[in-house]
Amino acid sequence: MNILVTGGAGYIGSHTCVALLEAGHSVIIADNLCNSKRETVETIMQITNKEVTFYEVDVTNSEAVDVLFRNHKIDGVIHFAGLKAVGESVEKPLDYYYNNIVSTMVLAKACLTYSVNKFVFSSSATVYGDNEVPFVETMRLLPTTNPYGETKAMCERILTDIAKANPSFSVSLLRYFNPVGAHESGLIGEAPNGIPNNLMPYVTQVAKGKLEKLRVFGNDYPTADGTGVRDYIHVLDLAEGHVVALEKLTEGVHVYNLGTGQGTSVLELVKAFEEANGIEVPYEIVARRAGDIASFYADASKAKRELGWSAKRDIIAMCRDSWRFESNNKTEGF
Ligand code: NAD
Ligand code: WQD
């Protein structure tokens, strides 16, 4: 298939492009590079030894998107492009609502115009809000605590309504849990700008000596060791999940959790990182971070049952591969 991958130069998008190319699909990337670099497109080609077509475009721009659909016979769209920083979304709600929702509507409209019937959307476990764990796809979604989470819930609803009114338009809503890790080559991975908000990139930067120590946000949660529990998933498992979701997409709207089903606490992750890489990660316990939930992880059984997909890589592999990428990463003075 010819797949349009929006946000394909980004963290999850780049790994998914590699997985798509390795599975024999052709890839057209549309990315405005607001949170990624053009070189990543070259690196995807280097890893796979295959060609990729790249457009530097903003996918909220309907004229630019129309050109893509006119120039290529597209069989399916994977829509990763979006703004994703939770804290920033509270500061700049309009940017988040505009970028994430308008891009989804512009792409869906182009799909209807050009009879492109397969649409895979990057959603997030954040749409479950503070539900009971494990999170199951059938749960009623609860309000999230930030505009970013609301954009994901709204896009899910918009795509669901479009699919209802256009029965040949098939949609897969993929709810990711906490993606970490990097390609085994160490050539692509997560390279956040400035001080990372997420745990794993913070840990790798402490390990590298770029940051002094990890601040563990609270050890008084009702979890086994008191620290927050999450379902970390290797980005390559996530990437493979997209390929299967696209290949097996049938009419209607399908919702899948992409997680491992396994919870890991902050201190367990630190220990796994130290064990995997033989590097000490200094940390201190500080106050809870506002908006954090104590614990969440996926019920990952639906994706296994319906798609035959489950995550294969364990927390040690996630820590090893995250570190390999960070130690290769020459950005920001290193
Ligand atoms: P990322 O920032 O690395 O990748 C997003 C890419 O989209 C970037 O390359 C950026 O330049 C591009 N982009 C943003 N707005 C665009 C626009 N209007 N037009 C064209 N390109 C645009 O983020 P990621 O971690 O790879 O996330 C990919 C998707 O998955 C996002 O939609 C994100 O919300 C979602 N998601 C991420 C996580 C996570 O923890 N990383 C979890 C759940 C869901
Ligand atoms: C994980 C755990 C923290 C940093 C966020 C978004 C979510 C999704 C993924 C997109 C928590 C603790 C963290 C640190 C710490 N993104 N922590 N010290 O908050 O589960 O999810 O990213 O959809 O929407 O909210 O991920 O990596 O920030 O935190 O102790 O410096 O690590 O408290 O328990 P989170 P995270």
Image: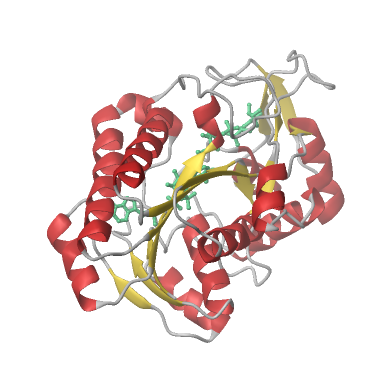
Q: Is residue 60 above or below residue 139?
A: below
Residue 188: name its quadrant: bottom right
Q: Tell how many labels.
A: 0
Q: In front here: 266 or 263? A: 263
Q: Is residue 72 above or below residue 236?
A: below
Q: Is residue 291 above or below residue 192?
A: above
Viewport quadrant of the C terminus: bottom right
Which x, y percent locates residue 133?
70, 24
Which x, y percent locates residue 328?
62, 66
Residue 298: name its quadrant: top right
| Residue under the image location 56 percent in, 35 percent down | 125
| Residue under the image location 48 percent in, 80 percent down | 45
Which x, y percent locates residue 43?
49, 75
Q: Kindly tell me whether residue 226 is visible in this rendering.
A: yes
* In this picture, residue 87 sits left or right of residue 174: left
| Residue under the image location 82 percent in, 45 percent down | 272
Viewport quadrant of the N terminus: bottom left
* In this picture, residue 220 sits left or right of residue 83: right
Q: Kindly tell me whether residue 208 is visible in this rendering.
A: no
Which x, y percent locates residue 154?
35, 32
